[in-house]
Amino acid sequence: MIDLRSDTVTKPSPAMRAFMIEAEVGDDGYGEDPTVSALERRVAALTGFEAGLFVASGTMGNQVALRTLTQPGDPVIVSARAHLLQFEAGASAKNSSIQLLAVDDRHGYPDPDQVADLVRQYRRLHNPIRLIAVENTHMPSGGVPIDQTVMNAIIEAADGTPIYIDGARLWNAAVALDVTPAGLCQGAIAVSTCLSKGLAAPMGSVLSGSQEFIERARIERARLGGRLRQAGIMAAGGLYALDHNMSRLADDHRRARSLAASIKTQLPSATADVLGVRTNIVLLKVQEPHQYLARLHEHGVLCNVLPAGDVRLVTHYDLDDRAIELAASRILASL
């Protein structure tokens, strides 16, 4: 079975497992786990912030950020297909009692003109936008990386409104654009970055921001049941991943382009967008996508269908060139 459902399905390598076993640990609830602290400092430095906070997942990172940066009733701008809106089970309303205002994201980022309009409108209503959330890469658009030119347009549209980055695949964006992660975070108040997607660690994300922000975020993490103990074993997987799995993200991107190209070459009518594949996600439009998934499963391929009906194929650490070639042939046989 070739698993293209997500880059979260990867297994830690033997070398990563060995590194995790040897990790020095302590009680992180008391701030005494040296490996967790090392990971938090490392990710904060990579993203250009003062401090970091290790959390169990990307969703927890997003939710802790919202609870720290907003008050109940606050309006928050998100893109129409954002993870915050579609894939967190209504957590933003449940946990923070905020209003999520969706704007067009057909190009892979929140439309700056719509952002500017909402900022102006809500100021006139004496209920100013509290936060603007940007997802980088933008998964539902096929992993589109958001560069600094686009970010500058969003920052200008924000007109001083704070910007938060859901950077679940920020590492992919940095590699695809050949820039530093910190460069992609310029102008943002905070960012959450995932370790268990492209970097292939077994779990965890790091929320980064100012020291004052992280101190408040630590309280919100505790309120969500996320206070950690001897978590250095898991944090060590993240440290290993940062050292060994960052540069190889380019291989995932190359394989995604190869997969899209194989489908397009052998089936010209397919809508896999070869030129549009920038990172590790290929979107395929087919008739009756859920039935197609069942046929794919019979041919030995696993993948997902997004809410808009696109079949999502995600390359990752556990798939080599041969697996991608085999997946392409099975996908074509299933169409």
Image (cartoon, helix red, strand yellow):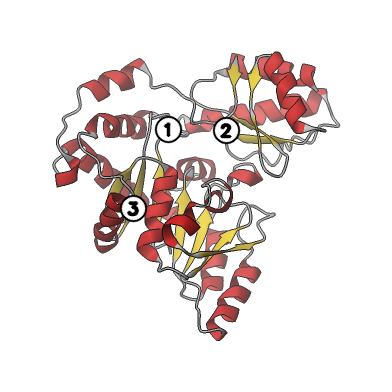
Q: Amino acid at mark 1?
A: Leu
Q: Is residue 330 above or below residue 208?
A: above
Q: CA distance from mark 3 to mark 1?
A: 17 Å
Q: Residue at x 64, y 42 (%)?
A: 142
Q: Nearer the viewer, residue 71 or 11?
A: 71
Farthest-out residue, right? 269
Residue 253 numbered tag: 2
Point out residue 215 in the picture as x, y percentages from the top left corner: 24, 58
- Dot placed on the residue nearer the N-terminal end, 2 or 1: 1
Q: Categorize mark 3 by other alpha carbons within 10 Å: few (<14), some (14-19), many (20+).
A: many
Q: Nearer the viewer, residue 243 or 168?
A: 168
Q: CA distance from mark 3 to mark 2?
A: 26 Å
**Residue 274 in which image quadrant:** top right
Q: Which residue is mark 1?
A: 199
Q: Residue at x 18, y 44 (%)?
A: 29
**Residue 118 in which image quadrant:** bottom right
Q: Which residue is mark 3?
A: 208
Point out residue 332 in the picture as x, y percentages from the top left corner: 77, 20
Farthest-out residue, front? 94
- Dot placed on the residue nearer the N-terminal end, 3 or 2: 3
Q: Residue at x 40, y 47 (%)?
A: 60
Q: Residue at x 27, y 18 (%)?
A: 18
Q: Is residue 50 visible?
A: no
Q: Is residue 301 left or right of 27 when viewed as pictured?
A: right
Q: Is residue 48 left or right of 104 when viewed as pictured?
A: left
Q: Is residue 87 above or below residue 291?
A: below
Instruction: Say which element carries label 2.
Output: helix
User: Mark 3 or mark 2: which is in front?
Assistant: 3
Instruction: Say which element carries label 1.
Output: loop
